[in-house]
Image (cartoon, rainbow, N blue to C red):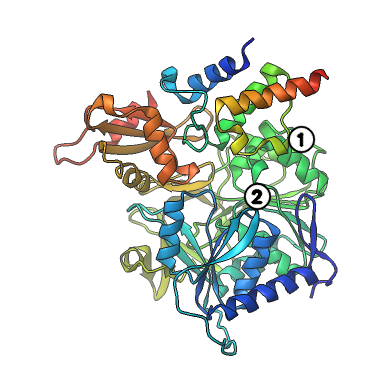
Amino acid sequence: MATPSAIAVEEEDRCTSFEELLRSARALAATLRARGVRPGDRVALVLPKTTEAVAAVFGCLLAGAVYVPIHPRWPADRVATVVADCGARLIFEVAEGDVRLAGGQGTAPSAAPPLPERSEEDAAVILFTSGSTGRPKGVVLSHRAVAAFVRWSAAEFGIGAADRIVCPSPLGFDLSTFDLFNMALCGATCVLAPESIAWMPRFLVRYAAAKRVTAWYSVPSILSRMVRDGGMGPGSCPDLRVVLFAGEPISGSDLALLTAAVPGALCANLYGPTETNVVTFYRIPGEFDKAEPPPIGRACPFAKVLLDDATGELLAGGESLMSGYWNRPDDNARAFASRNGRVYYRTGDRVRLDGSGNLVFAGRLDRQVKRHGYRIELGEIEMAISRNPAILEVAVVAAPGQDKGVVITAFIAAASSASLSLLEVKAHCAAVLPPYMVPDRVVFLDAVPRGTRGKIDYSALEKLARE
Amino acid sequence: MDIKQEIRGYVAEHFVPGGHGLEDTTPLASGGLIDSIGMLGLISFMESRFGVEFMPRDLDAQALDNLDRIAALIDRKLAAKGS
């Protein structure tokens, strides 16, 4: 048990003790129950990652509810779709600077019955991720699944009460289970980085140094920018002893800069889709000096992974496996595979074994891409763009960009070439897609190229996009 | 030197090929034209070009959402520097 007066959550200019956090969470849980929230009900958190949001997470869990984090910068339409999809009973949102509760779906409140015993298999959180058919999919994670990763990470990286953890990812990223629940499990301090600086490398480096951060977990894009443009070098973050990254490959050259910037720190590449959280990891040996990205390593002890011989696809199962997608029987039928009586998630990632027995990421089997660590289904962008009636045809492709990243290009055939401008297409995208899914480039065509069977010729478009 | 024209030039070159339709009040981030990584590049450009320094409190999405507001912010920074 953590010291009650120790700091549980720290923001730029305020600290909250474990005692205070527990008190807020209990009060919120009581409010939720008084407003009719029953165990298993969903509560949407349309909140930036602040102290209030952390209290709301624990308030939901204490009430036996399932928290559903939704980024407040998503377009209102997408927020409404997700809230309706998960049937949220109540919604936490920010109104005029304050967090308030709004009604979602559901019945009138009545006297709350006593809280029944909760099982490990009960859902704890639903994380919504890009869906190829145009609607985000809700990944349901049980208490068992979340705890498997958190307990392992605490032991593997020696997290304790002296640790000060930063995880500059929104609450809706599975990465945010690391800081929140290691705080609760180990008594560590969860240091929240203001979202406005999450992509400003030099401010993040200064923040990590000023807050004496000891453990870090983010997508590689953020760390790459910190070492390349943020002035992060030897001595700039002397307290950092654990640096973890996941979500996309990190280039060998950036990793070399990183290991040089935090000599003596334990750096590890973690791998796993939202559906399984982390299932493999690779500890970076000393100073990294290879040109290619590091392997994704070997299975975590709580996970089972195997390669599908026919396709090279990685199948992942074990303790951290999701319960399924919320309310999506068709997707669930496709998502899982059974091998020797065990259930696995089909990751869609092609993976191979290297000479030393480590797994190496080798690409995707479908049209999912990672851009700045965000997972994007190109099909979802196409569906969103095609909702504009002036657009006749749309095809979206991803190609490598100059700066090692991925550039997303939307090819569009409009009803009439004079009828639609770049600005209008971009504004439409911003109105229906989260900011990270808006295409970088828009190219107008008379018609989208198709093969003999009428299917969109994506390889021709990829060639065009590279030009 | 016209600050707004220089910023417009950068934004047109990097985010709006040809600059067609790019007005002083065209929404940049909320209009889907510039994402957070793009904003990082724009801020670096303005810092080196105008000799100003951005602070975390400047990174408000609203305050940087069109050319008018960005130019006004740079004006304020230059005035504060000169005084």
**Rendering coords of residue A252 (x, y %):** 60, 37
Question: Is residue B48 in view?
Answer: yes
**Rendering coords of residue B48 (x, y %):** 69, 19
Q: Check disc 2 and give the amino acid type.
A: Pro
Disc nearest the viewer among 1 and 2: 2
Residue at mark 1: A233
Q: Check disc 1 and give the amino acid type.
A: Gly
Q: What element does badge 1 sit on?
A: loop
Query: In terms of depth relative to the viewer, which is nearer, A229 or A114?
Result: A114
Q: Is residue A294 above or below residue B45?
A: below
Number of numbered callouts drawn: 2
Q: Tell me where residue A258 sits by quadrant.
A: top right
Are the residues under badges 1 and 2 in a single subunit?
yes
Residue at mark 2: A168
**Rendering coords of residue A440 (x, y %):** 44, 33
Callout 1: few (<14), some (14-19), or many (20+) C-alpha neighbours within 10 Å?
A: some
Residue A439 in the figure: left or right of residue A195: left
